Amino acid sequence: MVRFKNYSFKYANSQKLSLNKLNLTVNKGDFLLLIGKTGSGKSTLLKQLKNGLVVGEVIDGAINIDPSDKSISYLSQFVDNQMITECARDEFNFILENMGYTENQRHVKIAEVASYFGIVNLLDLTEKELSGGQKQLINLAAALITDPKILLLDEPTSQLDPIAAEKILQMVHKVNAELNVTVILVEHSLERNVFYANKMAIIENGTIILENNVDSVLKAIFQNDFYKNYLPQIDRAYLEFSQKDKSLPLNNRQFNRILNDYQNQLTCVRTSSELADSKKVLKVKNLSFKFDFESKKIIDNVNFTLKEGRSYCLVGPNGVGKSTLIRVISQQLIQQSGSIKLNNVNVKNNHSLFKNIFILPQNPALLFVSDTVFGEIKFQLEQKEEANDTVESILNRYGLLDLKDISPYDLSGGQQEYLSLIIGLIKSPQILFLDEPTKGLDPNIILKVNDLLNDYLKNGGIVFANSHDLVFATNFDYVSMMFDGKLTTFQTTSDFFKDKFFYTTEINKASRDVFPDALVWNDLRNK
Amino acid sequence: MNKLFFNFRRSTNNLSILFYLLSIILSALLFNDPVVILMIFVALVLMVLYSKKDNSRGYFKFFTIIFVTTIIFNLLINQRGAGIIFQIPFLKVTTESLLNAAILAFSFVNLLMAFYIYDSLTNVKVIFDLLSHKLRNIAIVFILTVKFIPKIIDIFESTSFLIKFRSNHTINNKLQRQLDLLETVLNKSVASFMNMSDILVTKGYGNDRIKQKISNTKIDYILLATSITSMIFNIIMVIQKIGKVDFGSMDVKIAFGNNIILGSVNFILIIIPILIGVFQYICWKWYVSKITASNTPTVKNFR
C-alpha cells in the first residue's frame, strides 16, 4: 500500500537530508508503530504521504502510494486550534463539502461517524466547551469521515492525560481492526501503543534501521543500550529478570503471574520515606481563580508550600486547571482571592518574581526570541551577571551543537521543549515551573532531563511541573492530583501512587499485590 | 426565553439570518432621532436577552460602561444650549447637551448590541458558505482572519509576558523594545500560520468544493422579506431626512410625528425573531402538541 524505495528528502530551508535512503513497506490493514529519537525524521516521513504538508525536495528514490491523496488522512499531535469552524458538525460539513459530497451524502456521513465515535452529543459544542480528549476524538472522527484508506497519526496522544489517551488509542485500534484502515502511528512512548500495533519500525537519522513484528522489535531493542529505554515498563521489567521466552508485549495480568512466580527472587528497591525539612520559598494560600463571573472556579481555594531543593509534580486529567495554576502563580492571570508569597514577599506587582522563577509554557515556542538556537543560548547567557560558559560550551554540553544554526521554530516539538528547558537551566532561577515538560521528548532525552533537573535540585532549586507522564512523575519528591480546581495534599511519590487504583503506573497496577511500592521497572531488582 | 430562541434558530437558515442581522445593524446605524433610537434600544435589549449567551452579563457591564463614558465625554465637550440644568465651574449641563449626549450614548450602545446579536446568531461557517459561492479566495482569507487574529493577539500577549522571565535587562528605548517584540511575535505568527495551512490541507481545502444549496422554509421567506423591505424602507426614510436630527446643535429636541411610525417599524423588525418564536411556541402549545403522539400526560389525557 505504501512503499518507500531508497527515498531521500531535504527541507527547502535545510542543507541536511531529513530522510536518507529510506526503505519501508506498509501493507493494507497494517498498524505500523514508528519510533525514533527526537528529530530523527518520524514526522517528516509521515508528512511525505500527504500532499502539501512538507515543502522540500526529493533528492533520490521514490514513494509508491496505492490510494489517492484524498484517501489519506492525517491527525497531528496538536489538540487545540485544529477546528477551522466553530463546532464538530460545521467542521464535518466543511470537510465533506471540500471533498465534493452532496447534502444527502454529508448527512449520512455525519450520522455514521457521530454514532461510531459516540459523539452525537458533542456535535454542536464549541471548541471551548470540549475537553482535550473530546477535541482529539472529534479530530480523529474528522480525519476518518471521508473513508480514508490510510490514517496517519503524529503523536496523537502526547497532549492527553493517560485515560483520555487510552480511549483515543482504543478507537484507532477499532478503526484498524473493524474497518481495515491502514494506520501509521508515530510515537515516542511505547506504553499502550504496542498492544494495538502489528508492526514496528525504528527510524534513525532519516533511515529505517529496524522493521519487524512487535515481539521481534521489542526483543531486539532490548539488546540495544540506546533503544532499550523505549521499552514499555512492563516489558522492560520482564526482559530484565526473566527467561524472555514469552511473546511481547505483556499485559499487566500476564506480568502479575510472572511476578508471583519470581516473587522470591525479586526485591523492590523503592521505599516510602519522609524527606528532610528545608527552607520554604513559595507559599500559596487560599488561592482561587475563575475566568468569568458565571463560570465555576478553575482554581478553588488552593494551598501549598514549595521548599528548597524539592521537586513537585501535579497530575490530573486535561482541563482541570493545572496550566492555569502555573499562569496564576506567574501572575499571567491575576487571582481573585488568596495570596502567593515568594521569599515571604507577595508576588503581586513584584518584579523580583520574574527574576526568581522561570516558566516553561505548554507551547515552548512562545519563549523564543532569536532566529537560531545559537542566538537563543547567547541571549540567555547575556542575561547573566557572571557567565562562565561560552555559547559553544553550553551547546556542546547539552548536545545542541548540530542544531545551532537552525531556527528554533523549525525544530521538532520535542527539540523545542528541550531547548526551552536548557534556557531555563541557564537562567538557574529559584523555581522552575514546567508545563508538560516531557511532551514530544524521546525516552532517552527524558532520562537526560531527569539528570539535569536532579543537578539543579542539588543546588537548591525547586521544580514544579504538570505532567501526564506518570513514569516521569515518579522521579519527583512530591506528587499531587488536581481535580475540580482543588489540589490533594502533596504526598511523597510512593505514598501518592500506591493507593491509586486507576491513576498510577503500569508496573504499580501489575505488581501492587506483591510489591506495592514498585512504580517503575528498575524498582524491581533481582536479589 | 431560550427555548423560543433555539426553536427559532433551528427553523431558519443562515441566509435569512444574515439578512436580518444586516438590517438590524443598518437600523442601529442610520438614525439619530431620540424617539427612534430609544425604540430601537428597547427592541435591541429584548433581543439581547432573547439570544443571550453565557457571558451576557459581562457584555451588559461593558454596554453600561460605554454608555456612561459617552455621556460624560459628550457633556464635557459639548456644553451648548440655553436650558441650563446645572452649572459648576468649567461645566454647564443643558437640556440640549444632555439630549445630545444621550443620543450619542444610545447610538453607540445600539450599535454594540446589534453586533452582540450578530455574534450570537451567526458563526464562521455561515459567512464562509455565503462567500464561497462566488468569492472562494476571500472566503478563505475571511476564515483565516477569524481564526488567526485572536491567535496573533494571544501570541503577542503571551510573548510580551513570558519575555520577562528570560530577560533581566530593561531596554530603556521603548521604540526599540516594541520593535524587538513585534519581530519576535511576527516570527512566532509565521510558524503558527504554517500550522494553520497544514490544517487546511488536511481538511481537503484545496479540492473542488461543492456549492451549498440553501433551502428556505416559510419562516425564512418571512424573515427575508421583512428584512429586505425594512432595509429599503429605512434607506428611503434617511433620504427623506426622517429619523435624523441635527446632532450636536442647539436645535436638537424630542419631537413626535413620522418618527413614531419609523421607530415602530424598526421595533417590530428587530424583535421579529421573538414574535416568530412566540408564534411557533403558541402553535406548538395549542395545536401541534395536541395532535402529536407523545408520552406526556397532557397529550395522553387528550387522546
Image (tube, rainbow, N blue to C red):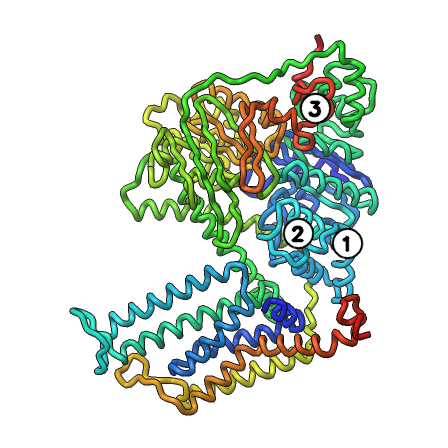
- Residue A190 position, x and y percent, is 70, 30
Q: Above or below — where is A291 with respect to A124?
A: above
Residue A346 visible from this viewpoint = yes
Q: Which residue is mark 2?
A: B202
* Residue at position x 65%, y 60% in the image: A90
Q: Please tell me whether mark 1 sits on a helix, a strand or a loop.
A: helix
Q: Residue at x 29, y 68 (%)?
A: B72
- Label 2 sits on what residue type? Thr
Tell me the quarter of the picture where residue A496 sits.
Answer: top right
Tag 2 and tag 3 share a subunit = no
How far separated are the C-alphas under marks 2 and 1? 22 Å
Mark 2, secondary structure of its residue: helix
Image depth: mark 2 or mark 3 in front: 3
Q: What residue lies at 65% left-to-right and 26% top-to-bottom?
A: A499
Label 1 lies in what chain?
Answer: A
Residue at the limit of the structure toward the top, as seen here: A527
Would residue B172 be found to the left or right of residue A298 on screen?
A: left
* Residue B177 image position (x, y, % from top left): 33, 45
- State how far apart marks 3 and 1 are (Cα): 35 Å
The residue at the far front in this view is: B301
Residue position for label 3: A507
Q: Is residue A392 left or right of residue A51?
A: left
